Image: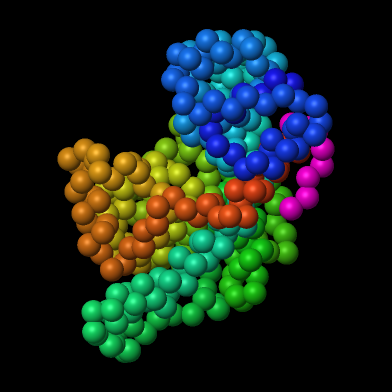
Amino acid sequence: MRILIVDEVHPIFQEKMIAEGHTITELYELSKSQLIDLLSNFDVLVVRSKFFIDEEIINAMPKGFIIARAGAGMDNINETLANAKGIILYNAPEGNRDAVAEHVIGMLLTFGRNISIADAEIRNGVWLREENRGFELKGKTIGIIGYGNTGKALAKKLSGFEMKVIAYDKYLSNFSDNYAQQVSIDELKAEADIISLHIPLSSETSHMINCHFLDTLAKKPFLINSSRGKVIKTSDLVVALETGKVLGVALDVLENERINHLQHDEQEWYRKLIASKRVILTSHIAGWTTESYHKISLVLAQKLLNKDFFL
């Protein structure tokens, strides 16, 4: 195969592909028009997030062309059109599932034990104990929405915390296992003390977490999002925070992650998020570890080579 790489990937990808006789071309400064002009010379396009693979790019690909995304989500690819044209799609959600699961647990513990608040106070010469009394995870119920690679990895890692783990996935059935019990979305809303989102971004999931969803929660849960920012309507989430419908939130992703170029209405919810002590924010780094960088590229290479992979 003739493989064009337009985003940096771990060298293990090139190593594996070259060892099997495939050719690699790395061009990281291409414009969209340059990419379109070059596609006929290749069989595989390896991309992360540099391009949105839209109709114009897909129309330049012959049937059987391969798009390999070095990442978990496929929201920067028009999957419907690609499938209709016979384009083959690969991604590597297995590569960063452990990283995401660990990050979610880190955010949960940080919130539950007031770690970031106490750290900031001490750095400013303030020593408070009673005000920072936290809560334990044992005995709490966590509801996982989306029981794919990251949802399953989180459930497995939570098993040592003696929590009740329930999960909802619209597209799966009979998936209860040793780590999570399958429930309906209404059961999850009724029981969860903590909710963690592990769903892809699509027309169906865009703004899935909105005022209606938040108003129908039975408890006042802590909400964690490490999936995609646009899954949550942030303005509605801010209202839920202000009215006490949620205990707090931890967001690794935002609706608009270009925080220096926010629209006026976005600036309002951004100001409110950063002003709240009940909000934890990280910069889309849940799946971003040294190990996941290697594993994503390794899994992608092994999928392209039609080989079993082990992590």
Q: In percent of the image, x 24 and y 50: which residue is there?
A: 269
In-front residue for pair 191/250:
250
Side of 23 where 7 appears, left or right: left
Looking at the picture, how far across and down is residue 189, in whole percent?
Answer: 47, 58
Is residue 276 at least partly visible in the picture?
yes
Q: Position of residue 230 (x, y in %)?
A: 39, 41
Residue at image position (51%, 29%) is 28
Report the quarter where the N terminus lies.
Answer: top right
Give the residues drawn in magenta, as a range.
Answer: 304-311
Name which quarter of the figure residue 66 lies in: top right
In the depicted view, which residue is nearer to us: 54 or 79? Answer: 54
- The answer to which of 280 and 144 lies nearer the viewer is 280
Q: Quadrant of residue 247?
A: bottom left
Q: Quadrant of residue 252?
A: bottom left
Looking at the image, residue 114 lies above or below residue 131? above
The reply, left or right, for residue 294 in relation to residue 131 is: right
